[in-house]
Amino acid sequence: MRRVHDGVPAALADEPDAVHRLRTSVRRLRNVLAAFKRYLDRDAAAELRSRLKELGDVLGKARDLEVRAQQAAAAADAAGLDDATRSALVDPLRTAHLHAHAEAVRWVRSERSRDLDRLLAEWAARPRLGDRAGQPAKKAARRAVRRQAARTLEAAPRLADPEAAHELRKAARRLRHTCDAVTREPVRLLGRKAKDLGEVGHRIQSVLGDHRDALLLAEHVRDHARLRTDDSRAYDDDVDRCQGRALSALATLPAALGDLQRQARL
């Protein structure tokens, strides 16, 4: 909770990677609350997760556009585009990022943000626990990790559906955050096996993130090329390169899922 609060000033200033760090802290807290919800006051945890989601959503728009602009610039350089063609491809993304960051700043300065600050302070002072909170901590941690590993594996067979890849990525991210929460100081309840599971979750999340980023960038380049009346072929190499990156990332997914299946029992 402190990381969320302390990360706001740098994110507002749009310092390098600050929005990414704050977004990660928000997601981490949301995922831990979800993974251990059976031990928490259900309504209170749902309220906090809802407010965190609002912040995460506005940060996510800004961060995604920031990354896409950086990747578009790198792809344009790799393809050897001239300055005018490069600017035409990259500048709209940079402008959209600035607008998205301004929207995030407005949210952080809003009454909704003040409500979130209040909730974070209340939870830090007195966590809202449920009836099951009296169970042994190590037992609860092990069950939470097992549930998240099973949830991730359940999402894997549906990858033919584009939305399923997104759901698998979210499940893998929650697995990672759950494992981190119980294997790192100051709460080191579980050991190497849980840490390994978290690392596999991180691998799956990263693979699918790289795949998604490459596909979205390819889509942006294609859409931009369609608007060009002079020579859209200048962007063909960019599209091919993005699609190749997407396929290369996805090719490593089966091995990561196999490792998860082997390690899923603690």
Image: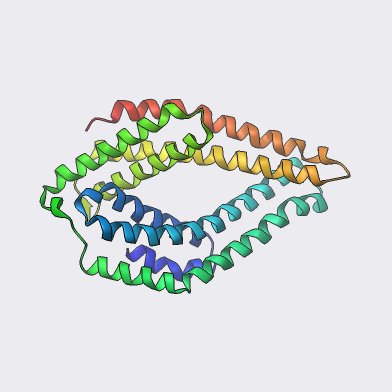
- Residue 190 visible somewhere in the drawing: no
Q: Does residue 77 appear to the left or right of 43 in the view shown?
A: right
Q: Compared with residue 167, is residue 137 higher up or lower down, i.e. above or below?
A: below
- The colour scheme is rainbow
Residue at 77 percent of width and 50 percent of height: 86
Residue at 74 percent of width and 50 percent of height: 89
Quadrant of the image for the C terminus? top left
Q: Does residue 250 appear to the left or right of 265 in the view shown?
A: right
User: Which residue occupies the foreground of this view, 92 or 158?
Assistant: 158
Residue 63 percent location from the top left of the image? 54, 56
Q: Which residue lies furthest to the front in this view?
A: 43
Residue at 24 percent of width and 48 percent of height: 182
User: Which residue occupies the foreground of this view, 236 or 37?
Assistant: 37
Q: Compared with residue 183, is residue 24 higher up or lower down, i.e. above or below?
A: below
Q: Count the marks.
A: 0
Residue at 54 percent of width and 61 percent of height: 16
Residue 172 percent location from the top left of the image? 39, 39
Residue 196 percent location from the top left of the image? 31, 37
Residue 40 percent location from the top left of the image? 21, 55
- Residue 91 visible somewhere in the drawing: yes
Q: Does residue 259 appear to the left or right of 252 in the view shown?
A: left
Quadrant of the image for the N terminus? bottom left
Q: Residue furthest right?
A: 230
Q: Compared with residue 176, is residue 240 higher up or lower down, i.e. above or below?
A: above
Q: Dividing the picture into quarters, in which one does residue 221 lie?
A: top right
